[in-house]
Amino acid sequence: MHTYAIKSISQTDREAMQQKLDQLAKPIAGLGRLEELAVTIAGIQHQSELSVSKRCCLVFAADHGVASEGVSATPQKVTAIQSVNLLNGHTAAGAMAASVHCGLEVIDMGVRASLPDKRIIHRKIRWGTRDMLVEPAMTRDEAQQSIETGREVAKQAIADGNRVLLLGELGIANTTAAAAILAARYALSPAQTVGYGSNISEKRYQHKIDVVTQALHKWQPASDDALEILRTVGGYEIGGNAGAIIGAAEEGVPIILDGFISYAALSLAELLVPGIEQHVIASHASKESGTALVTNLLNINPLLDLNLAVGEGTGALLVLPLIDAIQSVLTQMNTQTDMQFGYQP
Ligand SMILES: Cc1cc2ncn([C@H]3O[C@H](COP(=O)(O)O)[C@@H](O)[C@H]3O)c2cc1C
Ligand SMILES: O=C(O)c1cccnc1
């Protein structure tokens, strides 16, 4: 299996950043988790100043064979429709990206439709995964390819000058795949990881638990084999998310996760590269039930809790105003020494 050499976290730069923050005209630790955010980014970027102005949200899109089991209330074609609408600025994440000055890329990893739009990065592996209840969602080669593609796309975004990456996804039925991945990875019962996705009925919710239970019973992926979990119950866009996390960590670029689906991706990336969770920023505690359990297991602490359940990168995008606020503090605010030369009553 591939081994990945990720960049270290710079303790020196973490400490230098904390010292800078301590010298500002405010109570020590007064900016709370914003300080933590600055220190985290400094450690990942290996510098005591933040480079955060050029950023890009990578939205990986793919369809899921398991959609035919009735696990989502939403028609499958919505994946393709929203992939294009997003680039036009007319989906939740598309609209938000403009407001926080963030670039957007949509990567077709396996949408079940042709997407002739030239702005889309065409890396389609297959027209959707297979139905995990009937056969494994993908082949082992496809699983590896999805991770490699995510890695390459992240590295290209970094080569293009982006210094902060954000994750997003589009894929009808992908909360089913994410729940199955997390149940397999942490030996949890599907009832602990399955949620209401894009708002399904109680009846459909019970059925969704049954589908995940049966699929895991059928394939029994080993909890320590990321590729096997991805192959049997995963999704191409989830492999893409995992690969992007790895690619960003290799380059020393912070990557802001989005919701439940990106946490499933992190759980796989962490199997391939133990400790990689130190290289990510967890954005929000998704409405999807199971999120709190999983973020605890992953040892990550989401910054926001806004009851979001839309994905696409919305949660990740909402962290950018926080990063911009602490960046402005670092560049504009008085130090305690400067304060002495300011207004004197
Ligand atoms: C109109 C609409 C736009 C979306 N954009 C993202 N999602 C989100 O919901 C889907 C996952 O939920 P489930 O597993 O229940 O299908 C994914 O496409 C995710 O990105 C959407 C969902 C809907 C309905
Ligand atoms: O947590 C998420 O990102 C999420 C939850 C529900 C539906 N789509 C995405």
Image (cartoon, helix red, strand yellow):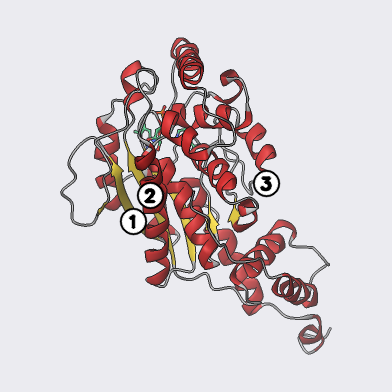
Residue appearing at x 68%, y 77% in the figure: 333
Q: Which residue is mark 2?
A: 59
**Residue 105 got which mark?**
1
Kindly indicate whether the residue at mark 2 contacts the one at mark 1 (C-beta within 8 angstroms).
yes
Per the model, the C-alpha gap separating discs 1 and 3 is 26 Å
Per the model, the C-alpha gap separating discs 3 and 2 is 22 Å
Callout 1: SS? strand
Residue appearing at x 38%, y 42% in the figure: 237
Callout 3: SS? loop
Q: Which quadrant of the rendered structure holds the C terminus?
A: bottom right
Quarter of the image where one finds residue 294? top right
Amino acid type, label 3: Asn
Q: In the image, residue 58 lies at what x, y percent? A: 40, 54
Evaluate whether residue 313 shows in this view: no
| Up-down relation of residue 108 to residue 102 (above or below) | above
Q: Which residue is mark 3?
A: 301
Ranked by sequence position, the earlier of labels 1 and 3 is 1
Evaluate whether residue 209 shows in this view: yes
Foreground pick, 192 / 23:
192
